Amino acid sequence: MVKDTPMKLKSIADWQTRGIRVWDVVSELVCLCTVPSPSNPFALDMRYIKGLPLSDRFLVTGALLSFLEMYVVYGDRDELHYDKVVEEVKPLRRLHVRALLELQRTRESTASASSPTVQDSSREE
């Protein structure tokens, strides 16, 4: 039987007293679990994201944008990785908008292909 031993994180211990945000926990986890510790714990693997199926790509980029934009607005500007996160947001936003446009085009072409045209409906009668 394996004993459950949760990680003791400084961010969790300071949650009540220091105004810790979720990105503080994420940053601490990434830095603790990655060797060597990354210069930007929020760095994105854009190649992976671009390789996702379209609907997943749209949802993932939207969720990541929401998270990173909250960090940019409310995060600590003195953190060494803050400027790197700001740089990640712009290409992520472009990718999200492209995914949205592609998703709309796909849905429009699917809708127009599946709905009968005036000529098609007159043939059926």
Image: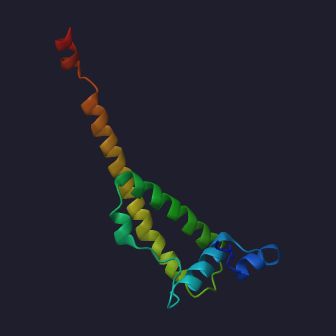
* Residue extending farthest front: 1
Q: Quadrant of the C terminus?
A: top left
Observer-nearest of 5 and 78:
5
Residue 83: x and y, percent? 53, 82
- The location of residue 58, given as percent across then percent down, is 42, 55
Residue 102 vs 9, above or below: the answer is above
Identified at 60% across, 79% down, the residue is 29
Q: Is residue 68 left or right of residue 87?
A: right
At 53% from the left edge and 80% from the top edge, which residue is drawn?
41
- For the point 55% across and 69% down, which residue is it? 68
Q: Is residue 6 above or below residue 60?
A: below
The number of discs equals: 0
- The one of 12 and 76 positioned closer to us in this rendering: 12
Of residues 1 and 60, the one nearer the viewer is 1
Q: Position of residue 17 (x, y in %)?
A: 83, 77
In which quadrant of the rendered view does residue 51 lie? Answer: bottom left
Residue at position x 67%, y 78% in the image = 7
Figure colour scheme: rainbow
Task: Determine the image quadrant of residue 14.
Answer: bottom right
Image quadrant in which the N terminus is located = bottom right
Is 8 placed above or below 57 here? below
